[in-house]
Image: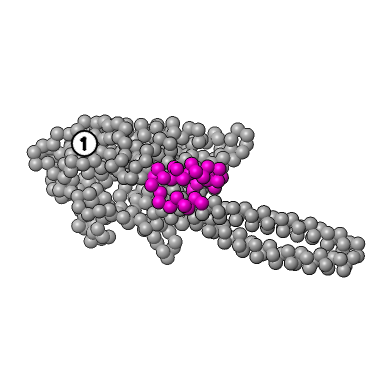
Amino acid sequence: MLQVNVIRQNAAWVKERLAVRNFSNIELVDVILSIDDELRKIKFSTEAIQSTINAASKEIGILMAKGDKDAAEVKKNEVSTLKAELAEKTVVLDELEINFQKNILLLPNLPHTSVAAGKSAEDNEQIRSGGKMPQLMEGAQPHWEIIKSYDLIDFETGAKIAGSGFPLYKGKGAKLQRALIQCFLDYNTAAGYTEFIPPLMVNEATAYGTGQLPDKEGQMYHITADGLYLIPTAEVPVTNVYANEIIKDASLPVMMTAYTPCFRREAGSFGSDVRGLNRVHQFDKVEIIQMVHPQDSYEVLEAMVAHVEQLLNLLELPYRVLRLCGGDMGFTSALTYDFEVYSAAQQKWLEVSSVSNFETFQTNRMKIRYKDEGGKTQLLHSLNGSSLALPRIVAALLENNQTATGIQLPKFLHSYFGDTQIVKP
């Protein structure tokens, strides 16, 4: 959530940055400032009335002590009238507070100054690429055919159990999934991240904290009877570990990693874009999250990007790093780098990670703070990234490494999987 003082002091600049991300309701800035003006006036008025009531109450005590009951009674009537007026203004104040929160929650984060204007993924900027493009054998297949012939994943039975988009991993497909999860967690913890196993359901306040609500309300699975949401990413519960806390300076930076299943209702478009593992409703992902001093956050962002990049190098996958334009960035992000791996059999790039700096947007919602050198409480910056999302990693590994005798696995995975390849049954 944007800080109202930032909006008030830099309204024109806020509108300019919102325009970079193609935010269509720029007028909302003026609506918020108008509500805030009214809030300030009502607060000032209620504080003045309360001060008058407090003073009158003391005066009543003095009058009663003197035995001047008539004068005291007059003052009591004045206080009664003031309290009725205060009650009316308090109702108005509460309504304004609700209206203010409702509107300010609709404003997305402001793009960093390095973010270019753009409308869609076509306007993203490629920063660099790495890895070696594979040369596929004749008759190479896309992963949705490979998983059938190798009996790795059963989409039909998954659909019978839960519905379309819920894959059933089996045999060596399940083993590969488990190997990747353990591999990613070990890689992250070796870099200093502390592992967490969070709840897979969160309450409404937690979902608001990271910005999933109200922005992605329709994309999350909602358990209405309990008011809980299935998590779309480990970012949601893990970032909220420190909600409403002041983190001691000695504990910074906070570095966290977690593996969770992720649940998303959206299924995307039709066609090859959503075939097989390209887009599913339930998938596994390992996440990295940091809470850092504001002056360090962009240096930390680059370090997190390098961390994910090295992991893709260890998996021996061809990849590219993109800096997202304003129109393609997520609601909560100030700057996002996407990682895409090349799927040789599909001849397309598949997104496998987003690494983002949210600055104070999330921490302001969750009230995650630290104390500066002067002892003043300040908001921290939060960052997160996928390290990594498994479905498209699995798709690229299967497609890019297929041979006549089996699926050759990168050396990095051999000890985790217990073999150098997946042999066709």
Q: Is residue 215 left or right of residue 408?
A: right
Residue 28 on the magenta segment? yes
Between 67 and 204, which is closer to the camera in this rendering? 67
Residue at image point 28% right, 39% down: 340
Query: Tag count in the figure?
Result: 1
Amino acid at dot 1: Leu
- Height in image: 303 above or below 74? above
Residue 85, by quadrant, is bottom right
Q: Quadrant of the C terminus?
A: top left
Q: Secondary structure at mark 1?
A: loop
Chief secondary structure of the magenta span?
Answer: helix
Direction left: furthest residue: 138
Q: Residues within 10 Å of mark 1 (few under 14, many from 20)?
A: many
Residue 423 x, y percent position in the rendering: 15, 41
- Residue marked by disc 1: 409
Inspect this view and state whether residue 78 appears: yes
- Residue 177 image offset from top left, x and y in percent: 27, 44
Depth order, front residue of 368/405: 368
Q: Residue at x 47, y 40 (%)?
A: 359
Q: Position of residue 255 (x, y in %)?
A: 45, 37
Name the residue rendered at 86%, 59% in the picture. 62
Question: Residue at 59% across / 60% down in the picture?
Answer: 94
**Nearer-the-camera pick, 265 or 77:** 77
Q: Which residues are magenta?
A: 1-30
Relative image position of residue 310 (x, y in whole percent): 32, 31
Vertical comparison of 224 with 34: above or below:
below
